[in-house]
Image (tube, grey):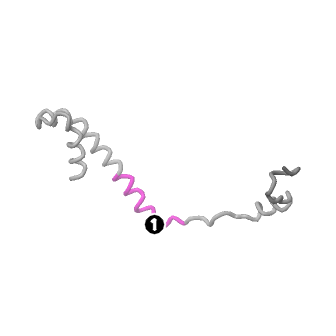
Amino acid sequence: MTAGGIAGTSQVPVADSVDNVESDKGPPAFHRGWPFWAIFPALSVTALLSAVEATVTSTALPTIVADLEVGNNYTWIVNAFLLTR
């Protein structure tokens, strides 16, 4: 090992590393125009409505299973409903 670090690594003077950090401005800012603000809320509402619809299906599941007499294959009812809507 060397006095200042791990053997085989290059030593960077402290003054150079501070100057490099200060000169780094980072990535450019991302501009969110009207397409972003039109699509993002639409996707959010769609996800919310999908979650509510799945909740309604799980509430009605005992009645559906009893009427169709499917037994242990009840998971296919919810999957079929979500795939066909």
In this orientation, which residue lies closer to the viewer: 48 or 37? 48
Direction from residue 64 to residue 40 in the image, left or right: right
The residue under the point 86% across, 51% down is 2
Q: Residue 85: x, y in percent?
A: 22, 53
Q: Residue 43: x, y in percent?
A: 38, 56
Hey, which quadrant is residue 40 in on the image?
bottom left
Hey, which quadrant is residue 22 in on the image?
bottom right
Disc tally is 1
Direction from residue 5 to residue 64 in the image, left or right: left
Extent of the magenta region: 31-46
Q: Residue 81 colored magenta?
A: no
Direction from residue 5 to residue 52 in the image, left or right: left
Q: Which residue is mark 1?
A: 34
Q: Residue 20: x, y in percent?
A: 78, 63
In this orientation, which residue lies closer to the viewer: 36 or 83? 83
The residue under the point 67% across, 63% down is 26
Crowding near pointer 1: few (<14 within 10 Å), some, many (20+)?
few
What is the secondary structure assignment of the residue under circle 1? helix
Q: Is residue 43 above or below residue 53?
A: below
Direction from residue 82 to residue 36 in the image, left or right: right
The residue under the point 84% across, 49% down is 1
Q: Is residue 65 above or below residue 47?
A: above
Indicate the amino acid at tag 1: Trp
- Dominant secondary structure (helix, strand or loop) of the stretch shown in magenta: helix
Q: Residue 84: x, y in percent?
A: 21, 53
